[in-house]
Image (cartoon, rainbow, N blue to C red):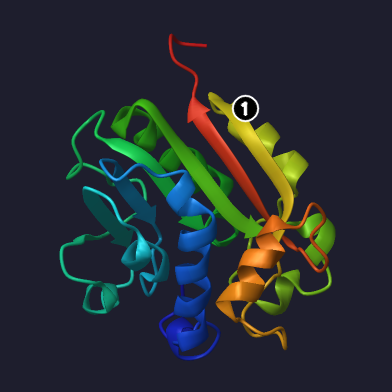
Amino acid sequence: MTAGYHDSRLAHDPRRNTVWKSLWRYYFSKRIRPDACVLDLGCGYGDFINNVVARRRIALDAWPDFPRHLAPGIEAIVGRLDRLDQIEDGSVDFAFASNLFEHVTQAEFAGVLDALRAKLSTDGSLTILQPNYRYAYREYFDDYTHIQVYSHISLTDFLAAHGYEVTEVKPRFLPLTVKSRLPTWPVLIGLYLALPFKPMGKQMLVRARPVRGGA
């Protein structure tokens, strides 16, 4: 990210926390156990990890200012995405990356997958939430730091090619951004997540786990 990215494209917006609080309540709380260890890769302002209720919460980002945005009790690691040395092998149950891998090269993405493999527990998984180019192609490069393009097809193929088994794919999971005119009322977010078809859904959700045994 460029030095001014958090002052321009990703300026702090309180609506973002409202959205993540609702996502936790209506979606992620049903998929993350209270005794889990959760790792938020590229956590930004910490809106996801701050709302997680879990035994252990870890946030990682290269942005040096992010720790001051974290809630008490969250472990902060400032550094590269593939530098997970501070995390014990086999300790992470739920790794998460939101709007991250479109900002890095494929080589960097592959490096994260390789480093994360050892850190995930036996039942551990990686959940990715990010723009789906198939549905967001008009706006995709409005963010000048986007350097890679993925659809739900290419992302699942990339994960498979790097030794991960994809277990869940939601091509249309959320609208693209909180900067839209759509309201961010919690009840409406809950209703939206319950819909079988997601109008204006331009972000995908993909969940995968490492293939064990050298496959």
Q: Which residue is the site of mark 1?
A: 160
In x, y percent, where is residue 87? 20, 42
Residue 146 visible from this viewpoint: no
Residue shown at the point (55%, 84%) measured from the top left: 9
Q: Nearer the viewer, residue 1 or 20?
A: 20
Residue shown at the point (43%, 52%) measured from the top left: 29
Find numbered disc 1 in the image and state the secondary structure of the residue it sits on: helix
The answer to which quarter of the image holds residue 203 is bottom right
In x, y percent, where is residue 31? 47, 43
Q: Nearer the viewer, residue 162 or 12?
A: 12
Residue type for callout 1: Ala
In x, y percent, where is residue 132? 73, 56
Image height of 50 relative to 80, above or below: below
Image height of 108 relative to 45, above or below: above
Q: Residues within 10 Å of mark 1 (few under 14, many from 20)?
A: some
Residue 145 visible from this viewpoint: yes
State the count of labels: 1
Residue shown at the point (73%, 41%) measured from the top left: 154
Relative to 135, 17 lies left or right: left
Relative to 130, 29 lies left or right: left
Image height of 70 relative to 134, above or below: below
Image height of 162 relative to 184, above or below: above
Relative to 21, 102 lies left or right: right
The answer to which quarter of the image holds residue 134 is bottom right
In x, y percent, where is residue 32? 40, 44
Q: Nearer the viewer, residue 78 or 177?
A: 177
Residue shown at the point (53%, 24%) measured from the top left: 163
